[in-house]
Amino acid sequence: MILYRKYLEDYSVMWEFLEIDCDDSLGKLTYQRNWRKGYATRAQAVEASRKIVDRNVPVTSAVYFSDLVRLWFEDYAKKVKGSTVLRAKSMFECHFLLSRMLGDFKVSEISESEIKRVIEVLISEVTKYKRCIYYLSQVFKFALEKEICNENPVAAIYVPGEVTTNKVVSPHCENFWEMEDLNKFMKIIQPKDLWKLDRRFVYFRLLAYTGMRNGELIALSWNDIDPIRHEIFIHKSASRDQDGKQIISDTTKTPSGTRIISIDSETSSILAAYRTLVCPKSFDEFIIPNSVGNMLSLTRPDTWLRRIIRRYKLKPISIHGFRHTFATLAFDAGIRVEEIQEQLGHSDSKTTVQTYIHITNRARKRRINRFHEYLRLGK
């Protein structure tokens, strides 16, 4: 696994990658580590790194922190999804692998005081730093298991709690739409006739009326739809592997994400009309493909949404905000929390209630009107 990291050059952020060379001219295999500099973007560094041999320094020759990180990632990648590895890699590239942090240190040079310095720098630059420190500790635990070092220098460091603000978030800034907002959006994108249906409208119809995740919806194929029962079988998801390449994972984000969800009859009719219009050659074809029939990019729907919001001056929300919207409006409609939890694919109702369900303006008005009526009748 090739490592990448940022560095500054003339006040500009540049990228470099680590090349490992082998030398056995003296009868003993030695490893030379060289950071190849000069790339304006990570993508350029990745492209250049494809021309070199991807070598790993074995455990017995692991001397530098970068060696340790490579070995840990190899082991970690066997246990988690590629998208999780990708997030962890990004964190190391932007923080711990920097030359001013630990990137150029030998493992033997990394003391408790050095880790304390690194953590202090991290805390000054990152708001959510505990997850970063957790990963750093995991790397040194791995090093202990492989006998690369004698102790975990992170274990004894006191890490202060992350600062949380008590700032009140305005309802206008929360990541969901009121019913009126959603209806306005759907009216904007809805074609006048069914025969003019396009993938963009079908995508947002499914997103808004089912609560599916973006990756789950992009991975949907026609054989996942049961038009008789008005149901959708969710059992796979579009995600990224550890190299950032978009793939179809044969599992959902969590085990509880594999589920069968119901759709309303109108959404089912829209799907049927859309299928007649696009006339798929196979049931394995994506329901929402890209312009040439392949898998849609995970970021394309966000581009669609931002353009519509900007053009029609709608309240800004993200693609994920549609899941919040579904949960909130479903609860406002009187659907039980357990049913919403099942529809969203959450493992417990706590996540559904504390994270996804928001208080709508209608609910606020009903609440105060109910209180007023209680006082009035009590006179």
Image (cartoon, rainbow, N blue to C red):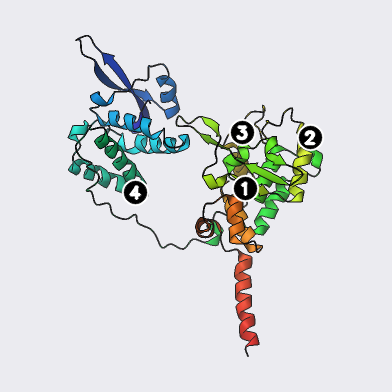
For the point 36% across and 34% down, which residue is it?
Answer: 93
Q: Does residue 315 appear in this view?
A: no
- The answer to which of marks 2 and 4 sits earlier in the sequence is 4
Residue 336, compared with residue 216, is above or below; it is below
Which residue position holds label 2? 277
Instruction: Give the quarter of the image for residue 121.
Output: top left
The amino acid on which the numbered mark 4 sits, given as a three-letter code, is Lys
The amino acid on which the numbered mark 1 sits, given as a three-letter code, is Ile
**Image coords of residue 135 (percent x, y):** 34, 41
Quarter of the C terminus within the rendering: bottom right
> Quick one: label 3, few (<14), some, or many (20+) residues within 10 Å?
many
> Quick one: label 1, few (<14), some, or many (20+) residues within 10 Å?
some
Which residue position holds label 3? 296
Q: Would residue 89 be found to the left or right of residue 113 on screen?
A: right
Q: Secondary structure at mark 4?
A: helix
Contact check, label 3 and label 1, Cβ < 8 Å? no
**Image coords of residue 166 (percent x, y):** 41, 63
Q: Nearer the viewer, mark 4 or mark 1?
A: 4
The amino acid on which the numbered mark 2 sits, given as a three-letter code, is Leu
Disc 2/disc 3 C-alpha distance (Å) = 19 Å
Disc 4/disc 1 C-alpha distance (Å) = 34 Å
Residue 181, compared with residue 73, is above or below; it is below
Disc 2/disc 4 C-alpha distance (Å) = 50 Å
For the point 65% across and 64% down, which residue is it?
Answer: 334
Which residue position holds label 4? 130
The amino acid on which the numbered mark 3 sits, given as a three-letter code, is Leu
Disc 3/disc 1 C-alpha distance (Å) = 21 Å
For the point 52% across and 42% down, which residue is it?
Answer: 253
- The answer to which of marks 3 and 1 sits earlier in the sequence is 3
Which residue position holds label 1? 309
- The answer to which of marks 4 and 3 sits earlier in the sequence is 4
